[in-house]
Image (tube, rainbow, N blue to C red):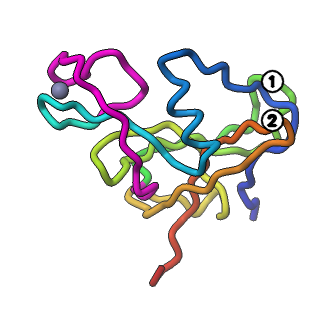
Amino acid sequence: MTLLRAQTGAIPRPKPSSLSKPFWDGLAAGELRFQRCGACHGATHTPALVCSRCGSGDLVWEVSSGRGVVETWTTVWRPQTPEFVVPYMPIVVAVDEGWQMLSNLIGCDHEAVVAGMPVELELHRLDDGVTLPYFRPIEAGA
Ligand SMILES: [Zn+2]
């Protein structure tokens, strides 16, 4: 058994742009933010200037429930840089509001993941103040 954990070392840090800054500021404030289109009401992520569905520029930020299900995943044993502790598990989460997010699974064995597994957001603040979004399984009955 190998418990998946949040990274705590000197891993590469995000470099927010003016476009993605509201997303990263949201994480620092304890919120998972995404954009919703005022024209077609579709949710979109990653941060964009126009709606990925209809092309409208009428996008507003909303706060997610932070819940969803695992769509797909991979287990990384050979990291891109040596600062990452392995294994770690990048996942695509289908978030409840109808958008997808690339994140990482923590809080369970690396062999426990299944498609459709319910997960919820868990934020981890690194020692330099950067907050990273992870997801962990929702315990039965939670
Ligand atoms: Zn739209």
Please say whether residue 38 is one of the residues in the magenta stretch: no
Look at the numbered discs 2 and 1 and tell me whether their residues touch, using CB distance below 8 Å: yes
Residue 91's spot in the image, x, y percent?
52, 43
Type of the residue with mark 2: Phe
Instruction: Determine whether the residue tagged by mark 2 lies in a helix, strand or loop.
Output: loop
Type of the residue with mark 1: Thr
Residue 84, which numbered label? 2
Q: Quadrant of residue 137?
A: bottom right
Query: Left or right: 17 with respect to 1?
Result: left
Q: Is residue 110 above or below residue 103?
A: below
User: Between 26 and 108, which is closer to the camera in this rendering?
Assistant: 26
Residue count near mark 2 (Cα–Cα under 10 Å), binned few <14, some 14–19, many ≥20: some
Q: Is residue 5 above or below residue 8?
A: below
Instruction: Determine whether the residue tagged by mark 1 lies in a helix, strand or loop.
Output: loop
Q: Which residue is mark 1?
A: 81
Residue 70's spot in the image, x, y percent?
44, 52
Query: Left or right: 60 with respect to 124?
Result: left
Establish whether ligand 1 lies closer than 8 Å to the Cβ of label 1.
no
Q: Which residues are magenta?
A: 44-69
Residue drawn at the location 42% of the way across and 27% of the way down? 46
Residue 60's spot in the image, x, y percent?
31, 32
Q: Is residue 106 above or below residue 88?
A: below
Residue 17's spot in the image, x, y percent?
56, 15
